[in-house]
């Protein structure tokens, strides 16, 4: 196909329709930014609207058209579009979020079925035609300037949507909340969540999500819309055209903390936060929050359920509730039905989307048919966060023919990790999503991405799976993502990533059973599988080390884990050597990415592993100065090496490290060892 050269010295015009929707305008501005970086120009890439006079000397025009709201029939619109450059509209499946992109004779048409389809089409042009890395806001792989820029004639279309909602949940977002100056304070008695993320920080993630055709965001943990600073996050999501939802610990947008704050604000402080003991007040609070969330109408996917304080079952904080499943199910059924009614009344009977997450006790009650969920509410199954595998409830709960089902999946999971380093084996993700298809449970997918940046690789792979969940080939997806990040070195990088995941050892079935029994998960026996079922990710290593120091007692029998820790140490150390050797074979920008992410994460996991071993050695074998110095040195190395990620926009990235909290680990280690 003949390459057609765009003359950057005379500029490009991005032509929007009059009164284009704000999400389309924002995406067009991102495209303008991409083109400016690629061309090295700060001028010459213009955005105009139909009817606006433009410089006729501009040889290239990118015309953006949104079918939504057109007064003509689709046939008439298609004929109108064909008048531009003979647009091949007959090939596109015009459905929700569909788009097509055509480049002909240096002219570009991007047409979308609706607003989000148009937005996705804009970013698809940027990624597929201009070659812009969709994760560049997260991974620092900026578009490469090329003054001799060429584009080819092409025409492509979006694939038919198989998953209605494809989302990210920014959970345990300690780094995102704190690395820029405070946007505002949160009214919450929980040390991990004191600051509100700045909207511009969130917007970098929203832009990235849209580039990957993600259409749903839960922007933070414990969002309280009654706090103006937190409502800004909700506004930021909606102005980008995305759907927004709520964490399962905050049904109706009301966490235990939000309900408590409401009572203090409205002069009822001291009343119990309980649907059972204080029903009238809880309904009042739900209605108050429903009215605030209803402002964002079509963007909201309402969350229904009943939770106690800090993600516990409601009977953990209300001992008056019977232990009988029938009674507990009746209470949750009543609460969800009440919430559904309140939303319906608030929206004056308009249709709305809603979910109910079968997290822990909800799965048991639903499986026993003790919990009834409204037919139009999407039922969400969760994996066991730290294992990234579904529990037994996913397999034994019978699906109802008139209900929609979805999944909540974790590539980030605080407590047992992963948190600051990748830890979800991609083969495991492949297995789990194919099971979700098999069990007809993929109308909705929400992915816990924590702070996203450290986990951007697995989040990207997941987004690619969601584009074709029924027929995806994991290996090809991984190769495609690696090609975007490593170019000609993708094959070498694939080998290194495989070794990284293989170096993470398995805590074993016994530990997993303890975990399930403690937290109310439902163990499922998968038999022999080729990857760790309960991987010892960074959160797990933190617990092992603190358990050795007698600072935490979540991990028992550390002595039995020492051989596996030593084997993992060897594998991470060997991988680090291989990464050093690989650097000599890669282009400079690729080496920079390799060092910032795979090399840093490998060293981070290596140093955490060595810290665990040194802590155990110190406490078990005579409290020697050497083992104390080794333990302290490992953490100091992490603090020094991770500065590589604190550059440019991301300066101060680790200021908010409150969950892994390497500085705290260092202080504890020094205190115990006396150094």
Image: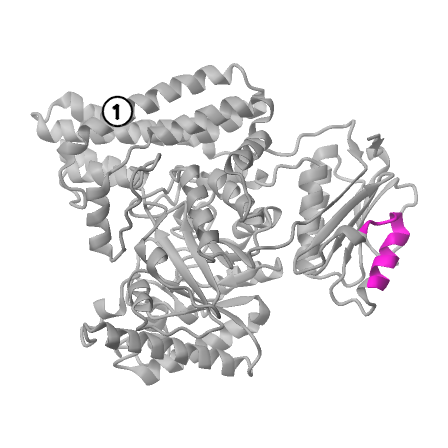
Residue 571, percent from left and from top: 32, 23
Q: How many marks?
A: 1
The residue beneath circle 1 is 567
Question: Which span of residues is magenta-colored?
Answer: 75-88
Q: Residues within 10 Å of mark 1 (few under 14, many from 20)?
A: some
Residue 407, percent from left and from top: 43, 56
**Is 167 left or right of 532, judged from the image as shown?**
right
Residue 135, percent from left and from top: 57, 40
**Is 23 left or right of 345, judged from the image as shown?**
right
* Residue 79 counted in the magenta span: yes
In this rendering, the answer to whether 38 lies above or below 14 is above
**Is 213 left or right of 101, judged from the image as shown?**
left
Q: Residue visible at 17% across and 26% down?
A: 628
Q: Is residue 580 visible?
A: yes
The quarter of the rendered structure image containing the C terminus is: top left
Q: Residue visible at 32% across and 71% down?
A: 369
Camera-side residue: 441 or 269?
441
Residue 71, percent from left and from top: 81, 70
- The majority secondary structure of the magenta stretch comes to helix
Q: Residue visible at 66% across and 60% down?
A: 96
Camera-side residue: 132 or 652?
132
SS for dot 1: helix
The quarter of the picture where residue 454 lies is top left
Camera-side residue: 656 or 460?
460
* Residue 111 counted in the magenta span: no
Residue sticking out furthest to the bottom: 280
The quarter of the picture where residue 612 lies is top left
Q: Residue visible at 46% across and 31% down?
A: 597
In this rendering, the answer to whether 308 lies above or below 463 is below
Camera-side residue: 91 or 256?
91
The quarter of the rendered structure image containing the N terminus is: top right
């Amino acid at each position: 196909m003949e390459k057609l050269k765009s003359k950057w010295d005379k500029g490009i015009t991005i032509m929007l329709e009059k009164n284009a929707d704000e999400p389309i305008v924002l995406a067009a501005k991102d495209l303008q930014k991409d083109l400016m970086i690629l061309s090295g120009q700060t001028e010459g890439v213009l955005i105009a609207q139909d009817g606006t006079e433009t410089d006729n000397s501009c040889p290239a025009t990118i015309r953006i058209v949104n079918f939504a709201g057109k007064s003509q029939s689709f046939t008439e619109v298609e004929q109108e579009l064909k008048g531009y450059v003979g647009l091949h509209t007959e090939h596109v499946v015009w459905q929700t979020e569909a788009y097509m992109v055509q480049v002909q004779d240096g002219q570009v048409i991007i047409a979308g079925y609706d607003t989000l389809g148009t937005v996705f089409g804009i970013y698809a042009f940027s990624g597929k035609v201009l070659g812009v890395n969709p994760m560049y806001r997260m991974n620092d792989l900026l578009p490469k300037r090329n003054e001799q820029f060429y584009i080819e004639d092409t025409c492509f279309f979006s694939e038919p949507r198989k998953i209605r909602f494809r989302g990210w949940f920014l959970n345990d977002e300690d780094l995102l909340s704190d690395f820029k100056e405070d946007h505002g304070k949160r009214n919450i008695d929980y040390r991990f969540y004191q600051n509100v993320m700045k909207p511009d920080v969130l917007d970098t993630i929203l832009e990235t999500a849209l580039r990957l055709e993600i259409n749903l965001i839960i922007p933070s943990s414990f969002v309280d819309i009654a706090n103006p600073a937190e409502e800004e996050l909700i506004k930021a999501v909606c102005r980008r055209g995305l759907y927004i939802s709520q964490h399962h610990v905050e049904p109706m947008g009301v966490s235990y903390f939000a309900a408590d704050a409401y009572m203090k604000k409205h002069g009822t402080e001291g009343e119990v936060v309980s649907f059972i003991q204080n029903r009238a007040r809880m309904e009042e609070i739900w209605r108050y929050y429903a009215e605030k969330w209803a402002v964002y109408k079509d963007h909201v996917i309402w969350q229904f359920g009943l939770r106690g304080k800090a993600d516990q079952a409601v009977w953990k904080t209300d001992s008056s509730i019977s232990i009988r499943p029938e009674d507990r199910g009746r209470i949750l059924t009543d609460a969800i039905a009440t919430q559904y009614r309140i939303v319906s009344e608030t929206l004056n009977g308009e249709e709305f989307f809603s979910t109910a997450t079968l997290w822990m006790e909800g799965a048991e009650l639903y499986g026993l048919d003790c919990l009834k969920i409204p037919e139009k509410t999407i039922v969400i199954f969760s994996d066991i966060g730290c294992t990234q595998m579904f529990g037994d409830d996913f397999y034994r709960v019978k699906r109802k023919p008139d209900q929609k089902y979805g999944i909540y999946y974790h590539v980030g999971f605080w407590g047992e990790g992963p948190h600051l380093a990748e830890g979800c084996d991609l083969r495991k993700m492949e297995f789990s999503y194919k099971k979700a298809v098999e069990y007809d449970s993929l109308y909705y997918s929400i992915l816990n991405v924590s702070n996203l940046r450290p986990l951007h690789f697995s989040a990207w792979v997941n987004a690619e799976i969601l584009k074709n969940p029924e027929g995806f080939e994991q290996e090809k997806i991984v190769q495609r993502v690696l090609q975007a990040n490593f170019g000609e070195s993708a094959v070498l990088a694939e080998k290194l990533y495989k070794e990284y995941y293989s170096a993470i050892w398995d805590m074993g079935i016994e530990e997993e059973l303890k975990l399930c029994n403690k937290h109310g998960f439902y163990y499922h026996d998968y038999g022999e599988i080729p990857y760790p079922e309960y991987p010892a990710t960074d959160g797990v290593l933190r617990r092992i080390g603190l358990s050795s120091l007698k600072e935490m007692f979540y991990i028992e029998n550390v002595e039995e884990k020492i051989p596996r820790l030593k084997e993992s140490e060897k594998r991470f150390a060997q991988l680090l050597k291989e990464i050093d050797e690989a650097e000599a074979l890669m282009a400079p920008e690729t080496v920079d990415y390799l060092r910032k992410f795979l090399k840093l994460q490998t060293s981070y996991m290596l140093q955490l592993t060595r810290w665990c071993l040194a802590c155990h050695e110190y406490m078990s074998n005579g409290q020697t100065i050497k083992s104390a110095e080794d333990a302290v040195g490992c953490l100091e190395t992490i603090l020094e090496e991770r500065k590589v990620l604190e550059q440019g926009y991301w300066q101060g990235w680790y200021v908010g490290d409150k969950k892994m909290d390497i500085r705290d680990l260092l202080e504890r280690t020094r205190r115990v060892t006396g150094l």
